[in-house]
Image (spheres, rainbow, N blue to C red):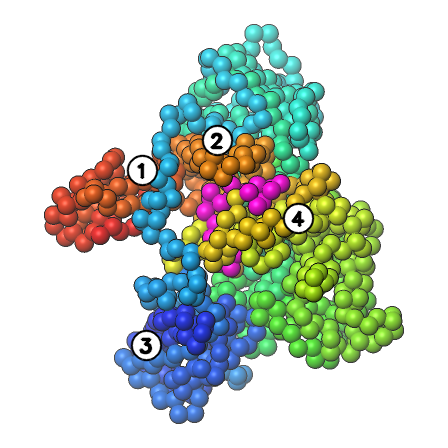
């Protein structure tokens, strides 16, 4: 007798309320048998992923739910479960911890395993469930005191109400904004007769310019070392560029354009490259989509340099994998907006994504996810990657050749790649891979070789759970084999950088979220601690960090990591908190500080560390975590544990005074201004120790390339503005109303830059970069339908007959008589969507 195919089993999931038994949620999963086969009463199990912790004792429907590990769960029939005949359905209700307010929170990646637990087990893919819409207040808010309003067309309209379309001459031509710019009369025409004149030391930059011009003109310019008399030329040269107020004088440049020449002078090759990005942005926007043989650029004089030396973007490919092409596209966008540090998070619990030739098991097992009963073939599914090992989000890695290509691509764009090998926590993929290596070599009788890189203590009975719900993701740091492992990875990694001709100056160790309870019941760790005279687990962890620091020093590398490494527990006024760890201040350690969630009490940790002497990178979750949802809308992808981040949130980030624009906490409550006033501010020393800022893209919800680009842009442009341009003048305004008025005016200009220039450029750049198109705001007021958009210059189109707006639908150009619209045949409301220059559209909103 055969079993129902996965494709013929339908799942429907719904969350009923977030106010069940206090602040828990109550959800249900409905299984419908659409096949012509009976789903038996036993012998099968559903496997799936969910980031929300289920309470197994609450599950109804004669099934049991078991937490396997991480976000991986199992649902199986119990005794008494009745077989499901064709056409029948079963419903399983359950209670979970905390809340579910978005489709992102739903369980995903279902597959069914028949003969579960037996040698002849096999799986059938079902996929994601149908998600019942969130419509009630108890479904759409986290708890009773969640004051963050739901994103509606009316609320969006209110947020956009002060925006208006500016004359194009009032809209900035270059993003990020240059330090000094003077716009002159006239234009220079780049055409087939234009020469690129440069010295040999700028050959890379000249090649880049030649390719960039070809992309928008289909013309390859000729290159020369000496400029012929009377020729029209783009001259690239290195020379003195005098600027003030910059932490990176070597990146300074001047760009002078007149009717017969373009003179680019950089303080270094990097400065020249920065000037090229400004020149690219002066090219006609339309040419990025439809190449023009003649490119007219305005005459000008620009002198520019970045505010911060470190202008970074982080990408996680451990949790879900992104292809080499996606990485290269992101690097190209980073270069266009003058970001210069790529923090590459290539390992995590859920995946090891880089080939290490000395340790092939790392990618043999650690880069693959899918149906498994033993994890000796690959890892379990995570984040909805499902049972199929071929799913490119769950499985994949960069070969040595791939990684060298990425390094060379980044280096040609003056972007340094900062690799992150996450230890001692977040290391499950590596642990499982080295377990495979151990057992394989032990079976061959090679005991010493088997133990050489072992990362676990097989007798460890420590009871812990990580933030991501793993119980076995921390390496055993009391074994010398762990340090053998790290050094071998470093050795192979450095060899790749050397072959690529790329700089490796910093190694990011992660070092975050080591769960409480790790190592406590490891015989190996306890014996080591006793031998070393250690009495506390923190001493063992500090030993590991010191060993790692010394190892990086041996390789001449800066020791980077998340802020937890630079913090120690302390007691202040009877309360337990954290403060700067003096042990690593002079250890060349660079903290990347993420935790400033408003209301959690750690908002000023970055400033404490900078004041204490740490060279600090601000990675603040509340403004710079681009994997978080743009807004509170159930359909908007992304987590929201640190808040919701619109592009304006990144734009209004004030690196040297993050409190300037802070108004509400995570739940939308007004911040206690007395507490805010008591937080540490930067001292003059601290100001000098803020070396830059970085945006983060964690990959739990990046299941394809389109999602990566949607989450990254346009927020990454706002990041670039804050990393490069000087502090906006409103940061110095004490009066709250005056400051808000200036902020609104500055945001209006930047929003116009997006709507009238930058988004249209991205429509053609790299064949079209898939940024998020903002939803229109709309409301009915005094009988008039009013609409707006957060990027003035984009087109809003609407329908009144119930159909979806398309590129042929009527454009919104001003207030409309709602009563007249409602007379249309098929009217159920006015549907509106925003359209790009290539007629990509936003999600649709409805006003009725």
Considering only order in the chain, which callout, 4 or 1, is on the residue closer to the N terminus? Answer: 4
Residue 576 position, x and y percent, is 68, 64
Q: Residues within 10 Å of mark 4 (few under 14, many from 20)?
A: some
Q: CA distance from mark 3 to mark 1?
A: 42 Å
Q: Which residue carries the number 4 mark?
A: 680
Check disc 1 and report its element: helix, strand or loop: strand
Q: CA distance from mark 2 to mark 3?
A: 52 Å
728 shown above or below 90: above
Considering only order in the chain, which callout, 1 or 3, is on the residue closer to the N terminus? Answer: 3
**Mark 3 or mark 1: which is in front?**
1
Q: Residues within 10 Å of mark 2 (few under 14, many from 20)?
A: many
Q: Residue at x 48, y 81 (%)?
A: 56
Residue 148 position, x and y percent, is 42, 56
Q: CA distance from mark 4 to mark 3?
A: 57 Å
**Mark 4 or mark 3: which is in front?**
4
Give the numbered dot on residue 32. 3
588 shown above or below 71: above
Q: Which residue carries the number 2 mark?
A: 215
Check disc 2 and report its element: helix, strand or loop: helix
Check disc 3 and report its element: helix, strand or loop: strand
Q: CA distance from mark 4 to mark 2?
A: 49 Å
Q: Say which of 442 and 259 sits in front.
A: 259
Q: CA distance from mark 2 to mark 1?
A: 26 Å
665 shown above or below 158: below
Mark 2–mark 1 contact, CB under 8 Å?
no
Residue 602 at least partly seen: yes
Left or right of 150? Residue 583 is right
Mark 4–mark 2 contact, CB under 8 Å?
no
Check disc 4 and report its element: helix, strand or loop: loop
Magenta-tinted stretch: 639-660
Quadrant of residue 378 within the rendered picture: bottom right
Mark 4–mark 3 contact, CB under 8 Å?
no
């Amino acid at each position: 007798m055969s079993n129902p195919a996965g494709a013929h089993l339908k799942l429907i999931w719904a969350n009923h309320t977030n106010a069940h038994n206090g602040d828990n949620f109550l959800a249900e999963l409905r299984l419908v048998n659409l096949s012509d086969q009976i789903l038996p009463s036993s012998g099968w199990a559903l496997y799936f992923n969910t980031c929300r912790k289920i309470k197994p004792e609450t599950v109804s429907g004669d099934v049991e739910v078991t937490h396997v590990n991480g976000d991986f769960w199992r649902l199986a029939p119990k005794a008494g479960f009745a077989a499901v005949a064709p056409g029948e359905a079963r419903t399983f209700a359950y209670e979970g911890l905390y809340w579910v307010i978005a489709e992102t929170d739903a369980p995903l990646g279902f597959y069914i395993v028949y003969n579960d637990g037996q040698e002849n087990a096999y799986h059938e893919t079902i996929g994601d469930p149908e998600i019942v819409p969130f419509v009630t207040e108890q479904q759409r808010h986290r708890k009773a005191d969640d004051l963050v309003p739901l994103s509606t067309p009316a609320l969006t309209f209110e947020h956009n109400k002060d925006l208006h379309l500016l004359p194009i001459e009032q809209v900035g031509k270059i993003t990020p904004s240059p330090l000094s710019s003077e716009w002159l009369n006239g234009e220079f025409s780049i055409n087939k007769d234009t020469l690129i004149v440069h010295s040999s030391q700028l050959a890379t930059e000249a090649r880049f310019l030649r390719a960039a011009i070809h992309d928008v003109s289909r013309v390859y310019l000729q290159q020369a070392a000496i400029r012929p008399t009377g020729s029209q030329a783009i001259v690239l040269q290195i020379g003195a560029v005098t600027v003030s107020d910059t932490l990176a004088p070597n990146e300074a440049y001047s760009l002078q354009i007149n009717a017969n020449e373009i003179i680019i002078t950089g303080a270094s090759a990097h400065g020249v490259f920065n000037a090229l990005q400004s020149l690219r942005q002066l090219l006609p926007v339309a040419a990025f989509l439809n190449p023009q043989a003649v490119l007219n650029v305005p005459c000008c004089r620009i002198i520019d340099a970045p505010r911060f030396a470190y202008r970074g973007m982080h990408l996680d490919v451990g949790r879900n994998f992104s292809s080499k092409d996606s990485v290269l596209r992101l690097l190209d966008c980073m270069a266009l907006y003058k970001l210069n540090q790529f923090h590459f998070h290539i390992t995590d619990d859920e995946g090891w994504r880089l080939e290490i030739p000395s340790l092939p098991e790392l990618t043999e097992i650690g880069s693959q996810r899918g149906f498994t009963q033993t994890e000796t073939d690959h890892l379990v599914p995570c984040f909805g990657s499902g049972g199929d090992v071929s799913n490119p989000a769950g499985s994949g890695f960069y070969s040595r050749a791939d990684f060298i290509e990425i390094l060379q691509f980044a280096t040609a764009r003056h972007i340094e790649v900062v690799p992150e090998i996450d230890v001692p926590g977040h290391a499950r993929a590596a642990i499982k891979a080295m377990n495979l290596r151990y057992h394989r070599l032990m079976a061959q009788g090679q005991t010493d070789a088997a133990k050489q890189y072992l990362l676990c203590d097989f007798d460890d009975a420590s009871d812990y759970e990580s933030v991501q719900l793993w119980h076995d993701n921390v390496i055993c740091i009391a074994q010398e084999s762990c340090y053998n492992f790290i050094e071998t990875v470093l050795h192979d990694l450095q060899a790749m950088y050397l072959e690529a001709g790329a700089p490796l100056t910093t190694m990011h160790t992660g070092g975050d979220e080591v769960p409480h309870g790790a190592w406590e019941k490891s015989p190996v760790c306890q014996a080591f601690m006793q031998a070393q005279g250690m009495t506390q687990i923190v001493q063992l962890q500090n030993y590991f960090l010191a060993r790692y620091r010394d190892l990086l020093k041996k390789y001449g590398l800066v020791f980077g990591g998340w802020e937890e490494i630079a913090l120690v527990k302390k007691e202040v006024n009877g309360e337990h908190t954290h403060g700067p760890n003096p042990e690593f201040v002079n250890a060349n350690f660079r903290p990347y500080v993420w935790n400033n969630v408003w209301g959690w009490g750690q908002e000023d940790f970055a400033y404490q560390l900078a004041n204490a002497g740490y060279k600090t990178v601000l990675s603040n979750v509340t403004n710079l975590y681009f994997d978080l949802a743009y807004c509170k809308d159930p359909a908007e992808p992304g987590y929201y544990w640190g808040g919701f981040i619109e592009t304006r949130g990144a734009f209004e980030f004030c690196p040297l005074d993050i409190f300037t624009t802070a108004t509400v906490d995570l739940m939308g409550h007004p911040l206690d201004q007395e507490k805010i006033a008591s937080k540490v501010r930067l001292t003059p020393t601290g100001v000098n120790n803020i070396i830059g800022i970085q945006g983060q893209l964690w990959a739990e919800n990046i299941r394809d390339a389109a999602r990566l680009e949607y989450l990254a842009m346009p927020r990454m442009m706002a990041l670039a503005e804050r990393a490069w341009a000087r502090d906006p003048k409103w940061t110095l305004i004490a009066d709250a109303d005056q400051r808000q008025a200036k902020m609104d005016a500055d945001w209006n200009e930047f929003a116009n830059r997006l709507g009238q220039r930058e988004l249209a450029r991205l429509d053609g750049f790299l064949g079209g970069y898939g940024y998020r198109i903002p939803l229109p705001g709309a409301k009915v007021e005094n009988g008039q339908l009013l609409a707006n958009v957060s990027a003035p210059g984009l087109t809003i189109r609407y329908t009144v007959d119930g159909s979806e707006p398309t590129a042929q639908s009527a454009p919104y150009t001003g207030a409309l008589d709602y009563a007249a619209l409602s007379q249309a045949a098929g009217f159920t409301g006015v549907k509106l969507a925003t359209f790009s220059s290539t007629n990509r559209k936003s999600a649709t909103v409805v006003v009725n």
